Amino acid sequence: MKFIDILRDHLDAFNQAYDGKITTSMRHAINAMLSCRVHTQRASHWVCQGCTHTADFPLSCGHRSCPQCQYNTTADWLAKQQAKLLSVDYFMVTFTLPYELRVVAKYQPEALYPAMFSVAASVLKDFALNSPKLAGDIGFTGVLHTHSRRRDLHPHIHFIIPAGSFNKTQQHWKKNKGKYLFNAFNLAKVWRARLLEQLAKLNLKLPTSLPKKWVVDCQHMGKGLPALQYLSRYLYRGVLPDKSIKSDVDGLVSFEYKDSQTQSTKVRTLPATEFLWLILQHVLPKGLRRVRDYGLLRGNAKKLRLQIQLMLAVAGAVFPIIPEIKRRLATRRCPCCQQPMHFMGIVKRLTNLIP
């Protein structure tokens, strides 16, 4: 059961049910997914190694919301992040947008999501500078997730943070000891005040009633690799993998999800049009980055990271051997002799492409 098949089968009903609510970004995502590996201007050209058979296959759409695409993009991101790992403990800090502001996320994501990133990053940097245990510059990676496990709109940003800071003046790495980093309640207070101030500067229309207490979670994660792997799941391949979709029967679509409270697997069933809206509402506007690096983990801080890694090694830190992430190469079998076919390159689209 594939999301694209459900989209194709129920597209007309979806367009009719949500006419006027479908954004330009959603339209681009829909058109890309419907043409994925079917209607493309270019094709991959393959030649059989055992006989003379050749074949052209349409290309993937490459859209970041397409569940069929972007496997290698995710693998490349994870490999780059693994190269930045430090031999220290890590924390995950999650800034959650309150329910009352989700309407702003729905209609003005271009303004809200960058504001969430910039404000949350400023809060973390200031808390690190003012912390007696750190009192220096930190690095962190933030990933925007717009959904809950039930795939409802639930914008929040996960930040993974190495437990330590770098003092530029002293050229010294200061390790954070213990399983405590920042006070989550204090983080939430500052997060609320600064984000509301920023949204007011952007002239965004806000609800009249907002909760006084917001939610920020700060958890000790141990090593950084499991956190990276968790964050990578929904980066570039849509919000619901095809393997989670269980059925599309009589206009009702069922999919599995893991309950956040009980950790048990549950099934949610919706009319097909509502299911499509549930998933497509998470398509981000074009150009809006879902993942961002800050401080010691930013792209142009490689020299400084190597310096810190050397300091940790001299201090006796043991760097774990991380298995290399290998790109999954495309393979095809010849329909005539079942021998492996060899990829020859990309060619202009020919007629009678094999879907």
Image (cartoon, grey):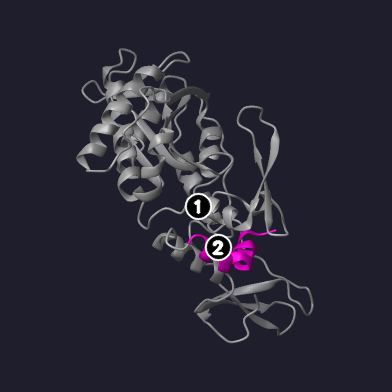
Check the image and report above or below for 299 versus 164: below
Bounds of the magenta segment: 1-18
Q: On the rendered structure, is 271 left or right of 17?
A: right
* Residue 14, numbered circle: 2
Residue 78 visible at all: yes
Q: Nearer the viewer, residue 9 or 132?
A: 9
Magenta stretch: includes residue 297: no
Q: Nearer the viewer, residue 252 or 344?
A: 252
Tell me whether the residue at label 1 lies in contact with that at label 2, contact meaning CB atoms closer than 8 angstroms.
no
For the N terminus, give its image quadrant.
bottom right
User: Disc 1 marks which amino acid?
Assistant: Tyr
Where residue 139 sits in the image (x, y, percent)? 35, 32
Q: Earlier in the sequence, mark 1 or mark 2?
A: 2
Q: Which residue is mark 1?
A: 236
Where residue 349 sits in the image (x, y, percent)? 53, 82
Check the image and report above or below for 214 versus 103: above
- Identified at 39% across, 18% down, the residue is 185
Q: Nearer the viewer, residue 318 or 80?
A: 80
Tell me the crowding category of disc 2: few under 14, some 14 to 19, or many 20 or more residues within 10 angstroms, Cα based: some
User: Disc 2 marks which amino acid?
Assistant: Phe
Q: On the rendered structure, is 28 left or right of 71?
A: left
